[in-house]
Every structure is written in C-alpha cells, then in structure tokens.
Image (spheres, coloured by chain):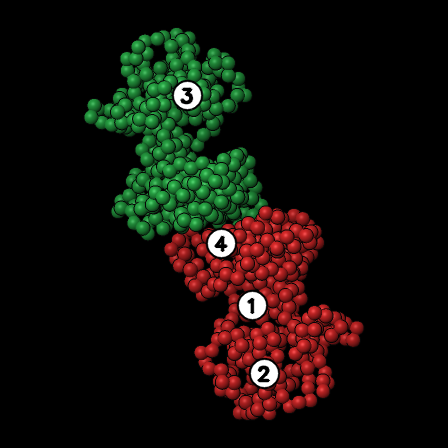
Chain colours: A red, B green
Amino acid sequence: MHTRECFVSAPGKAILHGEHAVVHGKVALAVSLNLRTYLRLQSTSSCKVCINLPNIDTFLSWEITALQRLLVGCKELGDLKELDADLLKRLREFTGISDGSTDTRSMAVLAFLYIYLSVFAEAEENISSPLTPQQESARWSKEEMELINRWALMGEKIIHGNPSGVDNAVGTWGGILRYHAGNITPLSRVPVLRILLTNTKVPRSTKVLVSGVKDKINKFPSVMNPVLESVNAVSCTCEHTLTEMATHGPSAEHYTVLEELIDINQHHLNVMGVGHSSLDTLCRVTLARGLHSKLTGAGGGGCGITLLRPEMDASVIQSTIEELKGYGFECWETSIGAPGVQMHSPTAVKQGILKILNSY
Amino acid sequence: MHTRECFVSAPGKAILHGEHAVVHGKVALAVSLNLRTYLRLQSTSSCKVCINLPNIDTFLSWEITALQRLLVGCKELGDLKELDADLLKRLREFTGISDGSTDTRSMAVLAFLYIYLSVFAEAEENISSPLTPQQESARWSKEEMELINRWALMGEKIIHGNPSGVDNAVGTWGGILRYHAGNITPLSRVPVLRILLTNTKVPRSTKVLVSGVKDKINKFPSVMNPVLESVNAVSCTCEHTLTEMATHGPSAEHYTVLEELIDINQHHLNVMGVGHSSLDTLCRVTLARGLHSKLTGAGGGGCGITLLRPEMDASVIQSTIEELKGYGFECWETSIGAPGVQMHSPTAVKQGILKILNSY
C-alpha cells in the first residue's frame, strides 16, 4: 500500500566555457542543462528498500533491517566532508561490488546505499517538503540545499573518486556557476538560454585529452599559455554578458557577443588539440543556418552545444536537427540556466515523464 | 638588331606566420615563393624603350629622347628614400595616367618608367652582370642588392602607396625574412620547404579584413590581445625551428612542429575573423591526407599554403590538387625559402619559360 509519494528532479550539467583551461587554473562556467533526471520517492508498508533505475536497467531491493545492521558500530556520519571508508567497505561487502568495479550500475547502487544510510543516520537533519498545496514546484531553504549538495558530493566521491564538486553544485543550485581554482560561485542573476545539445557519439577518453593538452602546453609554453589566458577572458566576458542580460534584459547584441565567444573558444579548443572532425561538422552544419556551436566538456568527440536565439524559428531548428541526425548525431533542444533540484507536485510533472515513472 | 640580352628572375612572396598580428606590433615571417617572375632585358639599335608585359596584356614603347626630356630640371634622384613627386607628376602627364588610376596596368607602367629613369639618372651606380660564363645563375654583391631593393621599394611606393618594405625585400633577398615593428631581418640560414599554394579565388578586401581585426581587438581586448601574443610566439617558435633545420638538418620532428604551428595559427586567424569557408575546405581536404594548411596574407578567401614533407608521394599531392580543383581552386606545387632576384644564363632558363619570353 502506498502511503506517501513525492517527485523530485535535478538538471544535467554542461560546461559553457573554460573546459581544459580550468585544469590550468583558469575560470570555467558550468551551467545547468534542463534535461532533468526525475525521481519518484514512495513510502511503502513493506520492510524493504527498493530502487528502480530503469535507464540503467537496475531494479534492486534490500531488507531495511539488513541495511540498518550496516550502521552498527559505525562512527558518526555527521561532517559530510570525507567519505566514511569503513561504511563504504561494509557496503561493498554487502552488495558484492568489488574495489575494482567502476561500471555505472555498481557505482549507482553504492552511491544510493551510502546516501540512504547517511540520511538515515542523520535523522535529525531531515529535509522538509517545501511544497505548499498550491505550488507546482518548489525548492528548499539555503541550509537544506547545502545539505543536499553535500550529500550529492558524497555520491560524486563514490562514483568519480576525485570530483571537482562542480557537478553536484550544478545539480543542486542550477543556473550558472563560476569555477576557479577550486572555488565554486553561483552567478547571482542569470538568463535562461535556449540551446541545442548534440551528442556526436564519438567516444573519447577524458584522461587522454587532458594529458594531451598538458603535453602541448609543455611543448609550446609561449604559444599555449596566452591561449589559456584568452579562454579565461572568454569565460569572464561571458559571465559579465550573462549578468548584464539578466539585469537589463537580453538584447540582440548580447546574443552576438555570446556567439562570438562561442566561436572563439571553439577555435581555442582546437588549438589545444581537443577538437574532432565530428565537432567541425556540427559547427559547419549549424553555422550554415547562422547558429554558433562549440564542444562542451572534454572534446575529441562527445557533446557540443549550439546557442539558439529566442526568436529562432522552430522549423530552422528542426531542419538543423534532421541534418545532424544524418551524421549519426543525437540532438536535444533544451535550455541552460534552469533551476537546480526541485520538488514537484504530481500534477505538475509532464504526462510522459509520469507515465515512465509510474510504470515501475 | 639585338646586341645584348640578359635574363633575370625574382620570387613571389607569401606570409608564413604573423599576418594581421604584424599590424599590431607582432613578429611576422615573410617567405619567398619559388613562383618566379622572369624578365628578358634586350638592348636594341632602335631609339625606343619597349616594354612587353604579356601577363597583363601591356605592350608599349616610347622614344628615348622623349623620356630623357622628363629628367631636365629634375632634382637629384640619388637618395632613393622618398618618391620624387615632381618626376611622378611629369610621368603621369606624359603617360596620361590620372591621379585616381590604380589599375594594375597603369601602376606597372608608372613604376617601370619611374625606375627606368631613376636608373638612367644614376648611371654611375650601374649594376654589373654577376654571371661568369660557366654559371647558370648568379646573384649580385650585397651593395648592388641593396640598390636593387631600394629601387624595388620605389616601385612599391608607386603601386601600393604605403608599403611595409617586406615585398621588395623578399623579392630581392629571397629566403625568409623576420618583420617586426618596421624592421626587416633576413634569417641567416633557412631550409627550402616544399609547399602547395592554393588560390581559393574568393575575392576579399585586405582593408576591410584588417579593420575587422582591429574592431574585434577593441571589442574584446582581454580575449584578443593574448591571441596576438600567441601568434607572435608561433612566429618566433617557427623561426627557431627553421634555423635549427637549416643548421642541423631537417628531421621528421621538425616537420611535426611546423605542422602544429600551421594548425595553431590557422585557428588563431579564425579567431581574428579572417577565415572563410573556402579556407576551411582547403584545411579539411588536405588534413584528410595528413597535410596541414593555413591561409596566407589577408585571409577571408584569397590564398592558402600547405606544407609538404620531403618524402611526400607525388600521387598524394596530385590527388590533393585534383580534389581542390574540384572546389574551383587553383594550385601550384612550389617551394618557399628559394633565392631572391637572380640573373640567369639563357641556357639555364627552362624551355617553357624561354619560349614565352621569346614570343614577344
């Protein structure tokens, strides 16, 4: 019997500017992507904790009492700064996931159970429901959000090992974040921008790309260091422009600046050697329709983003997507700068999403 | 009756690195192109001076006495620093070429007559024939070359108006010249490099392109100034590599560096906004065969150069040329770093060239 349920969503993340340069101490802008992950949380009368992660074909359940036993003799989980290595070890033994496992399912299960037990052990720091009956969606207080962010970081630490803290911050806070030398600062006012996200489906190794950039800087320091400097200025100029757009309202000239910065940074990323012919194709196809694109993230294939002006005709976007699909790419029309983690009233969740969530 | 004849040739010019950045005080490398202009000089028993410029369909002759009269009362032409405005005015009146004319034929005629009269008025500073009977080609003494360079600069002043002095210097000295803040320094040791020169045949205005770069620097100074700095470093790194190749012999790694610098600079030129889809096509087509290209000169279309490694197979070059021709481009396989102005023995001039020269 279902007694209570709630719906929560969090945005995806992309890098707008500063990928790779950020590794060398320059400013990067991380943005929320309104391609959201939805979670339906249900209390049940069974004595089990069940997770259904249909995207990665994972459906598991555990006896609550068995999970509770894992906390016996465990030290406090209160600080949420470092992972509790002992608890993680117990979870690995409990689930049978070995130290060497890095596959998505194993990591998702470990992260879920670790956070589930952390929340359980911290019962006093419960997070309330921010939704009033009239609201479609709502967010939590700053303090509760900070707690969510810290929990999310724990998940990142389990999955990624050595996370920058940007991914969990974008998921929590949404909008646009400035990342510089380990410090993450949300931009106080940001516009929501329409974009096209394109997955070239060309696989790449982030580690190899990052190390290639480092080698190039070592080989040509006098050539490459000014390029990193210029990328830094691109991020700062973009930040300034976005703040202006949010404060005074966006103008056509603002969009022109954003487009120019996208083009410049894409050329710089090519200089760093992280471009790819598939990304050149994306840029060429979109530019033929007056649209400006750059890679986002590690490059060497992977994903690219294309800025769409507010007045952009739907038919132009559709024909662009069709042409890009012809190259084997996958496209999503979405936006950046959207809200972070949110709670939704069931009536506010789109039918399509609700249908998927309710089918498990 | 022909009493004496001599054959002279001078190379073309291209910019290897630093176009546009040079306008903003950065280093550029100008290189000779072994696409040579040939001149046959004949003394005749007629009382006329005749010029045949078949490339621009110009065939003219003047009475020597009429030309000599133009020098009467003219001040000395000895310093060769500034144009003699009075002589130029007399020449314009004499030829009927008005002040506003800038077409190639008019400029060529004015430049020829001005230099002809200058040489005539400076009889004491005659230039000797450097050819000994055994030699196929020969060059002049440093002092004579400097005189040739100064005369060529006068021609540039007539044709261009405000020349940098690089074009005449490359034509005179050949090889590779470093140009920085108005100073022109020939590199003492340079390798000869095989290249493909491609004319995209896309017309462009140098003036508009130069002013566009300036506007972009003014709009995004913090982004653009480091790019100019990086281009400067590309020129300096290239200069260093070329000197090393000439001193210690070229290696595959030297060529890899030259290719990387070409790619980097092409991206930088795109950042400056002087790229063009035709140049992207050139880069894409050549890169598909492992060849690296960049625009040379003003960009926005115009010409591009492609570096060819010494071991490059003729069939690969031929198929590249064929594909580029398919885009409406014109290609020449040639070399850079070739000698400057030279005198040739008639037996050393290629039959095809001799045939053309002798047909007028």
Q: Which residue type carries mark 3? A: Leu
For residue A290, side relative to residue A343 (left or right): left
The residue tagged with tag 2: helix, strand or loop? strand
Q: Are marks 4 and 1 on the same chain?
A: yes
Q: Earlier in the sequence, mark 4 or mark 2?
A: 2
Extreme left residue here?
A: B134
Label 1 packing within 10 angstroms: few (<14), some (14-19), many (20+): many
Answer above or below: position of B66 versus A298: above
Cα distance in 3D space between marks 2 and 3: 87 Å
Q: Which residue type carries mark 4? A: Ser
Q: Position of residue A258 (x, y in %)?
A: 61, 52
Label 4 packing within 10 angstroms: few (<14), some (14-19), many (20+): some
Residue A60 marker: 2
Cα distance in 3D space between marks 2 and 1: 29 Å
Q: Quickly name the residue at label 3.
A: B53
Query: Relative to the observer, which residue lies in front, B70 or B249?
Result: B249
Q: Quickly name the residue at label 1.
A: A166
The residue positioned 63% from the left and 57% from the top of the image is: A195
Give the position of the N terminus of chain A as an image quadrant.
bottom right
Q: Which residue type carries mark 1? A: Val
Cα distance in 3D space between marks 3 and 4: 46 Å
Q: Position of residue B269 (x, y in %)?
A: 49, 44
Q: Position of residue B183 (x, y in %)?
A: 39, 35
Q: Quickly name the residue at label 4.
A: A277
Q: Position of residue A136 (x, y in %)?
A: 75, 71
